[in-house]
Image: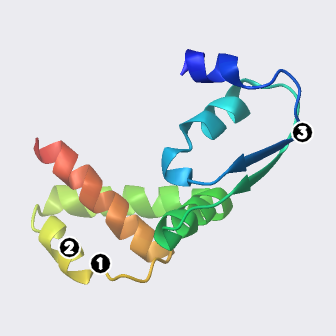
Amino acid sequence: MQQLYESAPAQFDRYFEPSLGGGVLFFYLISVRAEKFVAYLSDINSELINSYNIVKNNIEELIVLLKKHEIEYQKSSSKYYQLRELLDQKMTLKGLLDSLLLTELVIMSL
């Protein structure tokens, strides 16, 4: 990451990310740069862009829902299979929540 950061111009006021799936440099830049800049983020994967917007605009609600589902999962490990069956292709706040929970449950089971 440091090598990527060093190759970025010292001064800029706009940032274009054509593939947010590889947007690690964008997230690094917003965490270390004191100067504000306008960012144009895009990706061909509309679910990824929608997920980013949901996290950006509804983070508090998402955290509350994640905590609620974590408690439910601790009561019954079958929650993973229920969520997997319900996950649809249309990404919404609930869809993102379900996707994140599925990922978390897989990681927890490793």
Residue 6 lies left or right of residue 43; in this view the side is right
Picture coordinates of residue 32, whole percent (x, y): 71, 24
* 57 to 27, vertically: above or below: below
Residue at figure coordinates x 67%, y 63% from the top left: 57
Return the residue nearer the eye: 9 or 110: 9
Return the residue nearer the eye: 9 or 94: 9
* 13 to 69, vertically: above or below: above
Residue position for label 3: 13
Q: Is residue 71 visible?
A: no
Residue 37 occupies quadrant: top right
Residue position for label 2: 84
Asked whether the beta carbons under mark 1 and mark 2 sit within 8 Å of each other, the answer is yes
Residue at figure coordinates x 56%, y 52% from the top left: 20
**Which quadrant does the C terminus fall into?**
top left
Return the residue nearer the eye: 7 or 81: 7
Q: Residues within 10 Å of mark 2 (few under 14, many from 20)?
A: few
* 82 to 19, vertically: above or below: below
**Reading the chain from its start, which is encountered first: label 1 or label 3?**
3
Q: Secondary structure at mark 1?
A: loop
Amino acid at the residue labelled 2? Arg
Q: Secondary structure at mark 3?
A: loop
| Disc 1/disc 2 C-alpha distance (Å) | 5 Å
Mark 1 or 3, closer to the camera: 3
Residue at figure coordinates x 57%, y 59% from the top left: 52
Picture coordinates of residue 103, whole percent (x, y): 27, 55
Residue position for label 1: 87
